Amino acid sequence: MNDDLPLNAEDIAEITAIIEASPYRELDLSTRRFRLRLARADGAETGLTQEWQWAGSAPEAAAAEAAHTADPDAVAAPLPGTFYHAPQPGAPPFVAVGDVVGPETVVGIVETMKLMNPVHAGRAGTVAELIVPNATMVAKGQPLIRLA
Amino acid sequence: MIRRLFIANRGEIALRVIRTAKAMGMTTVLGVSSADATSLPALMADETVLLGPGPSSQSYLSVQQVVAAMVAAKCDAVHPGYGFLSENAAFARAVAEAGIRFVGPEIATLEGMGDKLAARALALEAGLPVLPGGEAATRAAVHARAAEIGYPLLLKAVAGGGGKGMRRVDRAEDLDVVLDMAQAEAQAAFGNAAVYVERFVAKGRHVEVQLLGDGTHAIHLGTRDCSIQRRFQKLVEEAPAPAMPEAARAGIEEAAVRLARHIRYRGAGTAEFLVDATDFSFYFLELNARIQVEHPVTEAITGVDLVEQQLLVASGKALTLTQAMVRPVGHAIEVRINAEDPDADFRPAPGRITRAAWPAGPGIRVDTHIAAGGEVPPFYDSLLGKLIVHGASREEAVVRLQSALARIRIEGVPTTAGLHARIAADPRFAAGGVDTGFLTGLAQ
C-alpha cells in the first residue's frame, strides 16, 4: 500500500514558502497514514518547523519504564543497556559477593549504543548480592548490585 | 535490473534507500530486528522480514541470518547502507554465493580497503601521498618506526575504523603503555590486535572526496570537509571543503580519482585525506567502500542522487555521468543530531522521543527516521537524524543553519542540537576551515 512516500524535502520547502507568504500560522494535515504539522516555530523569529506522526509506528507505552523503588543499598543502572559483570567474555568479573568496594570502584559495565559505560559503586561497602545476571538488558535506574 | 531490493540496515539510511529504490520502481524488503519492528523504515518498506532480537550481533550483524532472510524473500540485490555489514567481505561473498547482487564494490576491493595497511600500499602504488609511518609487527618495530617519524604520533588499528584502537602518543616514555591500550582496544573491537604507526599532524583537517565508478570509468563529485569530530567521529560535514585554494582542492580530487581508477573501483566510495591546515599538503588516509552518512551535502551541491547511482551501477549499467556533467552549485552543511548529552562527554541517551519538530523551508533537508513517539533503542548508534542546509554561498548556508537550529525542538532525550547551535554561532566556524581540534576549544 505504501507505494509513494509522501512529500520529499522539495515539497516541504514549497509548502513552507506558501505558508510564509500567507497570513496563516500553520498547516495541520491528517490522513489515514500520517499527520503533518507545519507551523511557525515557537520562540524563533522566523521560519517553520515540520512535525510528523505515523499511523502504526511506535505503539504507545510499549516500553513503559518500570518504576523502580529507590533502594538505598542498590547500585542502579546509570542508563539503559546491557549489563555485564566482566570487561570481556571469559574475563574475571569486576566484583564478587563479599568484595569490599569504594565509591569509585567499577562494579560492572552497561553497553549502550556500542559504547561501554562503567558503573561505579557510588559508596563504600561490601558486595552482598549480584541482582542481575550477566549480559541482561536493564532499564535506567534498575538495581544491579546490592551493597551491605 | 533489480526488482526486489533487500535493505540490510536500519534508521535514517534504511529510509533513505527505500525512498530512492521505490522511485526507481523496485520492491523494497527491509530486514528488521525486533526492536525496530515498528520503526518508520519498517512502515515504509513494501515488506519486512524479522532478522532476530535487538542486539546487533543477533540481527543486523549476523551474516547467516541476513543472507537467509534475503534468500527467503527472493530478493535479487542487497543494499547494505553504512556500518553493520556494509564493508564486510565475508558478507559480500556469502551474498554473491547466494546469487544476489551486492550494492557495493568488488569483494577484492573490500578486502584491500578493510586492511588499512593494504589500503596504504595500494595508495602508494597509485602515486598518492601517505603519512610517514607504516607497519610495525613487533614492539621493537613500533619503537623503531616511532624513532624514525618522531612525536607526537598516532597508533592505529590495522583492521580499524570509527576511532577504535586509535591512540595519540606524545612522548617516547609513554609509547609502551599506550601501545598496550591500543592493541587491547583493537583486539576487543576487531579481533585483531595489530597496529601501525603514523605521524600526527597537529593542525589537520579531514577532507574527503566522493567517488563514483563502474569498474571501468571513475569520476569525483567534489570534496567534503568533516573536521569537526568527537572521539574521531564526525559531527559536522560540509561541501565543498571551505577556505582552501582551488588548486589544493583540485589536487586532492585528482588524487582520489587516480586511486579509484587504479583499483577499478565500482560503486560509490569516499577517499579520506588528512590535510595540513597551514600549507594544504595532503595525505591519503583510507577509502570507505560504501555510502557515507554525510552523502547528502554532496547531493545538495551536485543534484546527483548517490543512492540511485549505486543502484544503477549495481544493476550492471555503465556510468552515464561524466566529470564535465558534475557542476557543483553553492555550499551545503550537514549536522548530525544524535541522542547524546554533549555536557556529559557525549554519553548516549536512548529513550522515547516525545516531540520532534524539525526545521522546514527552502534549502533545508532533514533525513530522519524519528517522529514523535519514536523509540531510540539502546542497541544501535545514537543518530536521530541529519539536518542539511544548502545556500548559494557558504555565508548563506551558515545563516540558514543558524536559523534552522534555532527552530529545532527534539524532546524526550538530550541531543547534540544545542551544541550545533554553539558551533554555528562560533566566529571561527563562520570563517571556515577549522581543524580537528575545533571542538575541544569551543566555548561552553
Image (cartoon, rainbow, N blue to C red):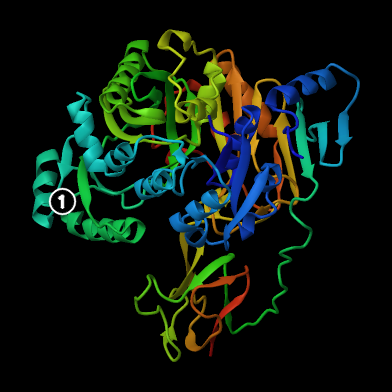
Percent position of residue B398, x then y: 58, 23
Which amino acid does the dot numbered 1 rest on? Ala
Q: Eyeballing the image, is A111 above or below B168?
A: below
For image coordinates 77% across by 38% down, the residue present is A51
Give the residue at mark 1: B172
Left or right position of B148 against B444: left
Percent position of residue B392, x then y: 58, 13
Q: Eyeballing the image, is B259 above or below B133?
A: above
- Quarter assignment of residue B233: top left
Left or right position of B105 against A61: left
Residue that protrudes farthest toward the right in the picture = A23
Q: How many marks?
A: 1
- Quarter assignment of residue A66: bottom right
For image coordinates 42% across by 82% down, the residue present is A95
Image quadrant in which the C terminus of chain B is located: top right
Residue B207 appearing in the image: no
> Disc 1: which chain?
B
Residue A138 appearing in the image: yes
Could you say which is closer to the camera, residue B232 or residue B128?
Answer: B128
Residue that protrudes farthest toward the top in the picture = B324
- Quarter assignment of residue B185: bottom left
For image coordinates 77% across by 57% down, the residue present is A59
For image coordinates 73% across by 73% down, the residue present is A67
Percent position of residue B411, x then y: 71, 49
Could you say which is closer to the camera, residue B283 or residue A30?
Answer: A30
Helix, strand or loop status at disc 1: helix
Could you say which is closer to the camera, residue B275 or residue A4?
Answer: A4
